[in-house]
Amino acid sequence: MNLTSEANRTSPTEIDSEVKAYQSCRSIAEVEQRLDELLKAPDGQEQAERLIQGWGQHGSWYDLAVVKLFWERSLPEVDGKKKRFNHRRLFEVTKSVLVKHSELACQVFWYYQWSSGVPDFAGMMHDLEPHWVCDRRVDDWVKFRLVLFYAGVASGLPIELSVGESAARAGFDSLMRDWFDQQAIILGQRPFLRYDHDLGRWVVDLDAKQANRYLTPAEQKASPRSTPLPNWDSEIIPPQPIHESVGEEEVELLGIPD
C-alpha cells in the first residue's frame, strides 16, 4: 500500500501517539470525540488510512473506532471546493487488511446488533430481495458500508472459503454488483440459516440443508449482543444505546450513555 507523501512524512512517534489515543478510550463519547477530530483534521485522509491499517492489532477500543468510522461516519469526497476524503484509497487500505483477516468484517454486523438491537431475520431477508427501484446514486462509501455489513451477516455460504470473505473479494468499481451477489448468495441459503448465539451471525445448517428441512423461526431468531464487538478485551464495557418503543414494531434510539 503506497501512502501519500504527507503520510510518509508522519513520524513513528506521531503514529504511536495516534494509536494510543484510540487505545486509551474508555467510553463511547471519547471514541466519538477522536473520530470527530479526525474528520476535521487537514490530514484526515491520512489519519483514516492509518487508523484502518491498525484494525485488529491494537485492542477492542481501537477496533471500535474503526467500525464506527465505517458504519456511522460520512466521509465527504468534496467539502465545498476542497477535496476531503478519497473513497477509493480508503477502500484499498481496508481491502489490504481484510485480505489477511477477512473475519474482521464481522465486527460491523456485530456492532450494528449491539447498537441497534436484535435484528429481525424476516425483515432483513425481505430487504435483500430484489426491488425494482434501486438508488445507484449513493456514494461509494455507502455502498462499501453495505458490503461490509452483509459480509458479517452469515457464514458457511457457498463459494465462501472463510467468514467475511465477500468483503475482501469486493472491487471498488463493482461495489453495487458485489452487494447484489451477496444478496443472491444469502437469500439462496435463507431456509437453512441458523442463528449462532456465540458467533453473533447466521450460519448455514448443513444437516438441515442436506435433509432439505427448513429451519423454524425460533432457530433463526437472533439474540442481543452484550459487548460492542466480539471478543471484547477491556474490563470496561460501555452501556448499550437506549431504545424505546414508540409504536408497533417501531423503535426510537434515545442515545448512548457516556
Image: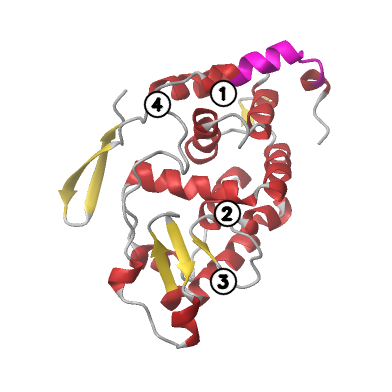
Q: Nearer the viewer, mark 1 or mark 4?
A: 4
Gap between marks 1 and 2, in whole Å? 22 Å
Q: Amino acid at mark 1?
A: Leu
Q: Position of residue 56 (x, y in %)?
A: 61, 37
Local crowd size for mark 1, using a 10 Å CA cut-off: few (<14), some (14–19), many (≥20): many
Residue wearing tag 1: 39
Q: Is disc 2 placed on a helix, strand or loop?
A: helix
**Relative depth, front residue between 173 and 222:** 222
Instruction: Where is residue 28? Give x, y as percent.
Output: 40, 26
Mark 4 or 3, nearer chain start: 4
Q: Which residue is mark 2?
A: 147
Rendered position, 140 above or below 35: below
Residue picked out by circle 3: 185
43 to the left or right of 253: right
How many neighbours does mark 3 have within 10 angstroms: few (below 14), some (14-19), or many (20 or more)? Answer: some
The alpha-carbon separation of the residues under discs 4 and 3 comes to 34 Å
Secondary structure of residue under mark 1: helix
